[in-house]
Image: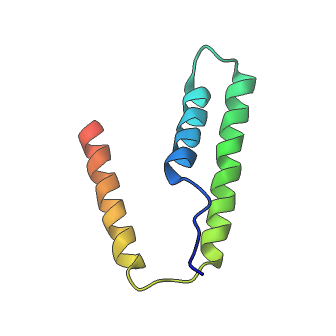
Amino acid sequence: MGFVKRYSVPDIMGQLRACAYDMNDMRLDGYTQWGCKQDLYRIKFMLDELLEKGHTFVPETEWLEEQEKERVVRILKDG
């Protein structure tokens, strides 16, 4: 039996973007915005922990470097 993917990356990313939007929405009070930021931190800490426990794969370093370069280009382009 093959691996069955039970989650949707686009859905998860969409929910994270919605949370980030609320975190920066000036129509919301600081208490609500701070709660959104705390949620994002909790997710970040969990992801960091999960990734540390994972194996290192052959193309991983190259892929991460490529992602970082794309991130820098986006920052320079937007800034």
Q: Quadrant of residue 23?
A: top right
Q: How many marks?
A: 0
Front residue (pair 58, 10): 10
Q: Is residue 34 above or below residue 41?
A: above
Q: Quadrant of residue 4?
A: bottom right
Quadrant holding the C terminus: top left
Q: Is residue 52 above or below residue 21?
A: below
**Residue that lies at the very extreme toward the top in this rendered image:** 27
Residue 79 in view, yes or no: no
Q: What residue is rendered at 66% in x and 48% in y?
A: 41
Q: What residue is rendered at 60% in x and 27% in y?
A: 22
Q: Is residue 1 above or below residue 31?
A: below
Q: Quadrant of residue 44?
A: bottom right
Front residue (pair 79, 74): 74
Q: What residue is rendered at 71% in x and 51% in y?
A: 42
Quadrant holding the N terminus: bottom right
Q: Is residue 3 above or below residue 21?
A: below
Colouring style: rainbow
Q: What residue is rendered at 46% in x and 83% in y?
A: 57
Q: Can you give x and y, in whole percent of width and height, for residue 39 in the image?
A: 70, 43
Residue 9 in view, yes or no: yes
Q: Is residue 39 left or right of residue 62?
A: right
Q: Can you give x and y, in whole percent of width and height, for residue 52 in the image?
A: 62, 74
Q: Can you give x and y, in whole percent of width and height, for residue 59 in the image?
A: 37, 80
Q: Is residue 75 left or right of residue 32?
A: left
Q: Is residue 74 left or right of residue 8?
A: left
